Amino acid sequence: MHDVEISRAVEILRPARRVLAFTGAGVSAESGVATFRGAGGLWEGRSIEEVASPEGFRADPIKVWRFYEERRRNVARARPNPAHTVLATWQDRFERYTLATQNVDGLHQAAGSRDVLELHGSLWRVRCVSCGTERDDLLVPLPQLPPLCAVCGAMERIAVVWFGEFLPPDVMAAAQAAAETCDVLVVVGTSAVVYPAAGLVGIAAEAGAKVIEVNPEASALAHLADVTLRAPAGEVLPLLDAGLREG
Ligand SMILES: [Zn+2]
C-alpha cells in the first residue's frame, strides 16, 4: 500500500455526500474475535454448517446453544479497534451514511455506531423459535439451557442468520437501497465472495458509485474497486480519516 493510494481514496471520499460502509469478518478479526470457522471449520467434531443451522438446533438445541455461549464469551473479551472507531465517527461526517455489516459481534455499536444494518443478525439478541418474538440479551455467560419465550413458552435461539436461512428482508432491503444511492461504497474486511457482499458491491458499482476496498488479502472484488488498499483496516481507516480531516 502506498501513500498515493491513500490519497486517491481520500480524494474519492472528500466530496462524497452519501457513503455506504460495508464490513466483514476481517474487521472483527483485528479485534481478536475468533473467525467463524475455527480449527478446520469444526466445533466439537462437527462442521459449523451442522451446528449453525435450523436442522442442527432441532436435533440438539443445547449443543447449538453452547456453541453460541462460547462465541459470546470470545466476543465479550474483544474491544473495538481503530477501524470500528473511524467508521462510527463517519456517521457525523457525511450527509447520509449507512453502515452495513456481516458481523454479529456488536463491536460497531460498542464503538458508538448507531442504526447498524446487521445483515447476519446479532449474537446479542435472542428470538423465539415459535412465535418469532425477539429481545436483547446481553448475558455472559449464557444460562446452560436455551431460555423459554415469555410470550408463548417455546425455546429461544440466538438471532443470527444460520446456514439455509434468508437474511432479514428489511435489513437487506435497506442495505440494497443504500448501495443503489451511495456516491461511495467502502468495503472493509470482507472478501465479498458470498452474497450479499458480492451483490451489494455489484449494485453500487452498476449505479455509478466509486468503490474503495480495504482488505489485507486479495479478493474477488479488485476488478470492481476504484482503489484497493491491501492493509489491515485498523491501519488504513485512521489514515483515510486523517486525510479527510486535513482537507
Ligand atoms: Zn414465543
Image (cartoon, rainbow, N blue to C red):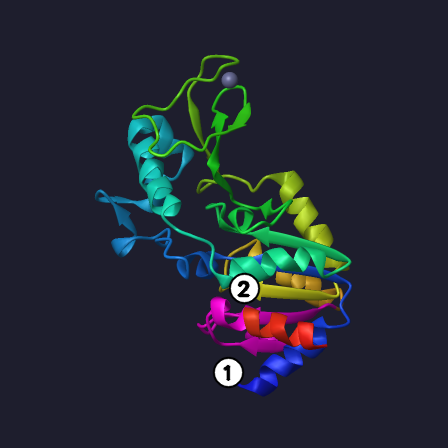
For marks 2 and 1, the one nearer the N-term is 1
- In-image side of 185 versus 164 (left or right): right
Callout 2 crowding tier (Cα within 10 Å): few <14, some 14–19, many ≥20: many
Asked if the stretch drawn in magenta spans residue 229, the answer is yes
The image position of residue 166, as x and y in percent, is 55, 40
What span is colored magenta in the figure?
A: 209-237
- In-image side of 90 versus 77 (left or right): right
Identify which residue is drawn at 29% across, 26% down.
Answer: 144
Q: Which mark is residue 1?
A: 1
In the picture, the quarter occupied by the C terminus is bottom right
Amino acid type, mark 1: Met
Question: Is residue 146 visible to the viewer in this orientation of the structure?
Answer: yes
The image position of residue 139, as x and y in percent, is 40, 31
Residue denoted by label 2: 188
Q: Could you tell me if the residues under marks 2 and 1 are in contact, i.e. CB atoms within 8 Å?
A: no
Residue 78 in the image: above or below residue 243: above
- Local SS, label 2: strand
